[in-house]
Image (tube, grey):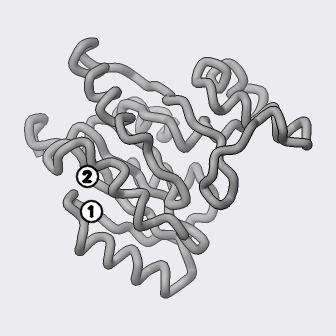
Amino acid sequence: MTERQRPLFSVVLLISGQARNLSTAVPSASVLGAEEVEIVAIDSSTSEKVHDQVEELARQSNFPVRVVRTAGTNVPQLWNAGASASNGRYLAFLDAEDEFHPDRLDVFRRAHVVCGGFAWGFSGVEAMDDRSRPIAVELIRDAALRLTIRASTRPIEAIRNLCEMFTPAANGNLVVDARAFRALASE
């Protein structure tokens, strides 16, 4: 595949468990055209229902979809499987329980055009409860959870805290140059 034929983004969609929001996760990337985005669906679920949902997603998607079934159970294994199967210049990670902000990939596309490329970047997130409703971070009672959620909602805090604590922004909102990611994964 030549550089011109490669999509700009490979959305690495991590699927495990029940994937309740699978039907909204992929369309959330639709601000860009099919020539700019491919979906690499990493299906590590043990549920036949989820497998069927993934196959239906692939059939109905406006984007090229590559489904990779893997028994990997930890996120780094799944990320590496997605990176290996992708063709895009950048990897944009997405959990099947989440969705992109409507302009997220477009912002990274503009950064690519204006800057001539980038190595990696985080986007901000909104704190949501398990029913996909916004939550007030300051009202979270568990202090450790409140701290990690607050840190994940601001990209600069997520980056500063990445070496000290897990933040949801560390995986769900990362966009990284695919070659750089693969090089790091092979070390």
* Nearer-N-terminus badge (2/1): 2
The CA distance from mark 2 to mark 1 is 6 Å
Toward the viewer: 14 or 179? Answer: 14
Q: Looking at the rendering, which quadrant does residue 16 occupy?
A: bottom right
The answer to whether mark 2 and mark 1 are in CB contact below 8 A is yes
Can you identify the residue that label 1 sits on?
Answer: 65
State the image coordinates of residue 134 (x, y, percent, origin top left): 64, 45
Q: Residue at x 26, y 22 (%)?
A: 110
Q: Is residue 31 above or below residue 71?
A: above
The secondary element bearing badge 2 is classed as strand
Q: Looking at the rendering, which quadrant does residue 131 occupy?
A: bottom right
State the image coordinates of residue 117 (x, y, percent, origin top left): 28, 19
Q: Residue at x 50, y 64 (%)?
A: 21
Residue lying furthest bottom: 48
The secondary element bearing badge 1 is classed as strand
State the image coordinates of residue 29 (x, y, percent, origin top left): 33, 48
Q: Is residue 87 visible?
A: no
Can you identify the residue that label 2 sits on?
Answer: 38
Toward the viewer: 165 or 63? Answer: 63
Please state if 54 lies on the left or on the right of 64 as rendered.
Answer: right
Residue lying furthest top: 115
